C-alpha cells in the first residue's frame, strides 16, 4: 500500500528549539504523508521562500499558515500560551502558537515529509 494511502503512516515534526526537551514534554506536530498533488503547492511555496531575498516574492502569513495545516492531523505536548494547560488539537490555533519563523521551519520540514538531514546522510553513504 502506498505510504500516503495508509491512514496509520505518520511523520513527526519537532521545532529545532524544542529538540533538547525531554521526549515526554517536547511539542510534536504529527502529519500524514502527502501525495504529489498536495505536496506540489508546498514545494512551490518553499521555492518562493528560497528565492524571496532576490526576487521579493515572500508569501504572506495566511498563505504560510494555510500551507503548514496541510496534512496536520494531531499534535502532542502543546501548551496553551495563556492558560499554561495542555491544548487539545485544533489546527486553526496554529497562529496562536507559532511565530512566522517557526511556521517557516515547519514548512521546510513538511516539504521533506520527515526525511531529515540524518536520513540524507544515511542515504548518501549507502
Image (spheres, rainbow, N blue to C red):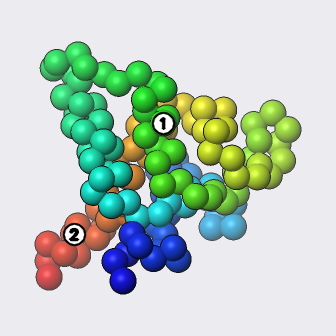
- For marks 1 and 2, the one nearer the N-term is 1
Q: Quadrant of the C terminus?
A: bottom left
Q: Is residue 46 visible?
A: no
The residue sitting at 39% across, 44% down in the picture is 107
Query: Up-down: is 102 above or below 39?
Result: above
Residue drawn at x 51%, y 45% is 69
Residue at 38% of width from left, 60% of height from top? Answer: 34
Q: Is residue 37 left or right of residue 104?
A: left
Q: Is 15 on the left-hand or right-hand side of 36?
A: right
Residue 73, percent from left and from top: 58, 58
Residue 71 visible in the picture: yes
Determine which residue is flagged by label 2.
121
Q: Which mark is residue 66?
A: 1
For marks 1 and 2, give the CA distance: 31 Å
Q: In the picture, residue 35 is in which quadrant? A: bottom left
- With respect to residue 1, does 62 lie above or below? above
In this rendering, the answer to whether 124 lies above or below 74 is below
Q: Considering depth in this image, is 82 or 55 the residue closer to the camera? A: 55
Residue 61 picture location, percent across and down: 46, 25
Quarter of the figure with residue 57 = top left
Judge by depth and name the residue closer to the eye, 19 or 9.
9
Amino acid at each position: 500500500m502506498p505510504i500516503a494511502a495508509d491512514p496509520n503512516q505518520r511523520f513527526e515534526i519537532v521545532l529545532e528549539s524544542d529538540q533538547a526537551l525531554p521526549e515526554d514534554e517536547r511539542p510534536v506536530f504529527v502529519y500524514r504523508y502527502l501525495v504529489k498533488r498536495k505536496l506540489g503547492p508546498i514545494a512551490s511555496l518553499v521555492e518562493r521562500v528560497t528565492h524571496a531575498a532576490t526576487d521579493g516574492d515572500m508569501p504572506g502569513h495566511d498563505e504560510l499558515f494555510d500551507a503548514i495545516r496541510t496534512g496536520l492531523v494531531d499534535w502532542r505536548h502543546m501548551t496553551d500560551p495563556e492558560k499554561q494547560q495542555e491544548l487539545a488539537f485544533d489546527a486553526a490555533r496554529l497562529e496562536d502558537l507559532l511565530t512566522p519563523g517557526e511556521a517557516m521551519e515547519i514548512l521546510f520540514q513538511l516539504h521533506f515529509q520527515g526525511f531529515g538531514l540524518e536520513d540524507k546522510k544515511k542515504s548518501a553513504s549507502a
